[in-house]
């Protein structure tokens, strides 16, 4: 068993890794299946040491074969094991058939899957569908998944929860709600974004001891990123550093009644190390923002002419928090689009951009799924069902670096590489979190990071700060609760 890898794959690529291990490195498929079953059973014993009655729900493919191995091992340990098989014995082939025969030898016979079979289980093992699912689950398969979900027993998924799309992280009609999932050989990208995290539960990984050279022969689909791996992008400052060395962020937003968003973005930029932060906001609450956080330089702006001298002094512009969609907001965005300063674009600036699309390379767009849907003129559900496809389309239409926020936030570089941050928690579902992220990314660009590096590090900083802040509980977590944790993280504390 190993920690989660950074390389992420689609289902087809994992199948190719499996093929290479078997055909190029001469590892019998049945050996890999046996290793998978052994790894799964080892996790089951550690996580549920008191479990005595195990029900393994198997399909007819290799995922079912893994389940047969688990059932055989559980019986050998003296556990009460039942196997529900949703396929005819005659349909079993290859390695799955061998695993089935080995299971039957120790006295485990398959049964029809019923709610009664699952009723008294201590643990249910999901070995039903595996990674090859490409259409909605129907009929008896759907009934079996529903039965597992309504059972009071925890479900342990082998390789991937049945019904979850391994590539997109979308639920194909219905999917198993697993307490834990063990994945093999290659970690599937869909497990870590969209609906994936909610259905996988705790994710474990085992490479089944295939040769490392196997991975050299298959392209990676995405990279899982963590703050610890990116923190070197912010080295310790020299003792001679002054505020001019640390960059000047201009944050534009805060239409009447929405001053909080721009203030949080500005403070987040300061807490992440920007040397200077200027706020350009509606004139009526400029003084209030300045009183609340005197380190911010706050200017009331009425039109583009008021904004131009502020733009000249900026190393990066963050626009959108509390911007609104009035004529004032559109005037602010128009003024910014005509300048050559790098941009971070969020919130209502994205909504205005959806009305009048624009394309450039020197910006970071940070939409949540609803904003992404407006930018693409599709439904939010369509974005969530195909998050990897959606972020690719966003970059094709708007350029630059794109951050698609949500559970398993995605970052797409200018070169087409996708990164995925699996940190963060549901407590982040509260107002102002996106405004803080905007300020974080802006601060990193101001301090000299390239756009893509700033987006990746910013996303990880933001998510890790939220995880630290959630120790007191996820519900009730405020965006401003992240500030002290951001400061500690950027200082390596």
Image (cartoon, grey):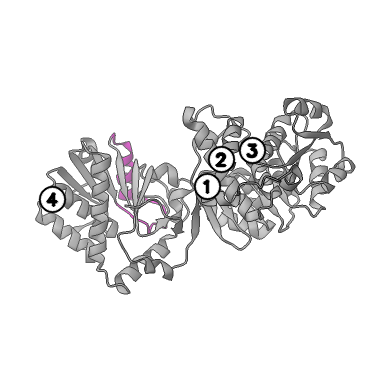
Q: Position of residue 347 (x, y in %)?
A: 68, 41
Specify few, some or many for label 1: CA neighbours under 10 Å numbering under 14, 14-19, or 20 or more. some
Alpha carbon distance from label 4 to label 3 = 56 Å
Counting residues from the N terminus, which is met first, the one under dot 1 or under dot 4?
4
Q: Which of the two discs, 4 and 3, sits closer to the camera?
A: 3
Instruction: Point out the stretch of residues depicted in magenta.
Output: 128-152
Q: Which of the two discs, 2 and 4, sits closer to the camera?
A: 2
Alpha carbon distance from label 1 to label 3 = 17 Å
Does any portion of residue 198 appear in the rendered image? yes
- What is the quadrant of residue 298 in the picture? top right
Q: Nearer the viewer, residue 138 or 191?
A: 191
Counting residues from the N terminus, which is met first, the one under dot 4 or under dot 3?
4
Alpha carbon distance from label 1 to label 4 = 47 Å
- What is the quadrant of residue 207 in the picture? bottom left
Q: Which of the two discs, 1 and 3, sits closer to the camera?
A: 1
Q: Residue furthest right?
A: 305
Alpha carbon distance from label 1 to label 2 = 9 Å
The residue where tag 4 is placed is: 108
Counting residues from the N terminus, which is met first, the one under dot 1 or under dot 3?
1
| Residue drawn at x 43%, y 42% as measured from the top left | 198
Q: Which of the two discs, 1 and 4, sits closer to the camera?
A: 1
**Residues tagged 1 and 2 counted as in contact (Cβ below 8 A):** yes
- Position of 10 with respect to 244 (left or right) is left
The residue where tag 3 is placed is: 436
Q: Position of residue 384 (x, y in %)?
A: 53, 48
Asked if 271 appears above or below 163 in the picture, the reply is: above
Alpha carbon distance from label 2 to label 3 = 15 Å
Which secondary structure lies at badge 4? loop
Mark sitting on residue 489: 2
Q: Nearer the viewer, residue 118 or 259?
A: 259
Q: Which of the two discs, 1 and 2, sits closer to the camera?
A: 2
Q: Position of residue 172 (x, y in %)?
A: 42, 50
């Amino acid at each position: 068993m190993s920690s989660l890898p950074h390389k992420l794959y689609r289902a087809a690529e994992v199948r190719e890794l499996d093929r290479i291990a078997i055909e190029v490195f001469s590892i019998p498929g049945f050996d890999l299946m046996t290793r998978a079953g052994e790894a799964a059973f080892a996790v089951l014993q550690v996580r549920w040491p008191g479990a005595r009655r195990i029900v393994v729900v198997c399909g007819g493919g290799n995922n079912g074969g893994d389940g047969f191995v688990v059932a055989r091992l559980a019986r050998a340990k003296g556990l009460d094991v039942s196997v529900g098989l949703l396929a005819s014995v005659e349909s079993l082939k290859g390695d799955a058939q061998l695993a089935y025969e080995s299971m039957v030898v120790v006295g485990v016979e398959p049964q029809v899957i019923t709610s009664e079979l699952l009723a008294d289980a201590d643990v249910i093992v999901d070995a039903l569908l595996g990674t090859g699912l490409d259409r909605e689950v129907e009929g008896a398969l759907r009934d079996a998944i529903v039965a597992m979900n309504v059972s009071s027993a925890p479900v342990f998924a082998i390789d991937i929860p049945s019904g979850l799309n391994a590539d997109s992280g979308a639920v194909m009609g219905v999917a198993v709600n697993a307490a834990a999932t063990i994945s093999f050989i290659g970690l599937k990208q869909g497990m870590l974004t969209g609906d994936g995290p909610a259905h996988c539960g705790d994710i474990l990984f085992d490479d089944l001891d295939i040769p490392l050279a196997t991975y050299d022969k298959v392209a990676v689909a995405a990279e899982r990123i963590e703050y610890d791996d990116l923190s070197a992008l912010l080295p310790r400052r020299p003792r001679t550093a002054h505020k001019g060395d640390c960059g000047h962020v201009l944050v534009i937003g805060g239409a009447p009644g929405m001053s909080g968003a721009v203030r949080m973005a500005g403070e987040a930029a300061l807490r992440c190390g920007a040397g200077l932060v200027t706020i350009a906001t509606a004139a009526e609450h400029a003084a209030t923002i300045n009183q609340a956080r005197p380190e911010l330089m706050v200017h009331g702006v009425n039109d583009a002419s008021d904004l131009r001298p502020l733009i000249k002094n900026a190393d990066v512009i963050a626009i959108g928090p509390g911007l609104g969609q009035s004529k004032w907001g559109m005037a602010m965005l128009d003024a910014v689009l005509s300048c050559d300063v790098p941009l971070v674009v969020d919130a209502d600036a994205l909504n205005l951009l959806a009305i009048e699309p624009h394309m450039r390379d020197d910006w970071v767009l940070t939409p949540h799924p609803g904003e992404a849907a407006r930018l693409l003129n599709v439904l939010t559900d369509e974005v969530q069902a195909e998050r990897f496809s959606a972020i690719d389309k966003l970059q094709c239409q708007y350029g630059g670096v794109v951050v698609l926020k949500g559970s398993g936030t995605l970052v797409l570089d200018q070169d087409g590489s996708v990164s995925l941050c699996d940190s963060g928690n549901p407590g982040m579902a509260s107002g102002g979190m996106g405004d803080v992220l905007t300020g974080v990314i802006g601060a990193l660009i101001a301090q000299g990071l390239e756009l893509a590096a700033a987006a990746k590090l910013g996303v990880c900083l933001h998510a890790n700060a939220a995880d630290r802040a959630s120790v007191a509980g996820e519900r009730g977590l405020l965006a401003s609760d992240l500030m002290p944790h951001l400061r500690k993280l950027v200082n390596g504390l």
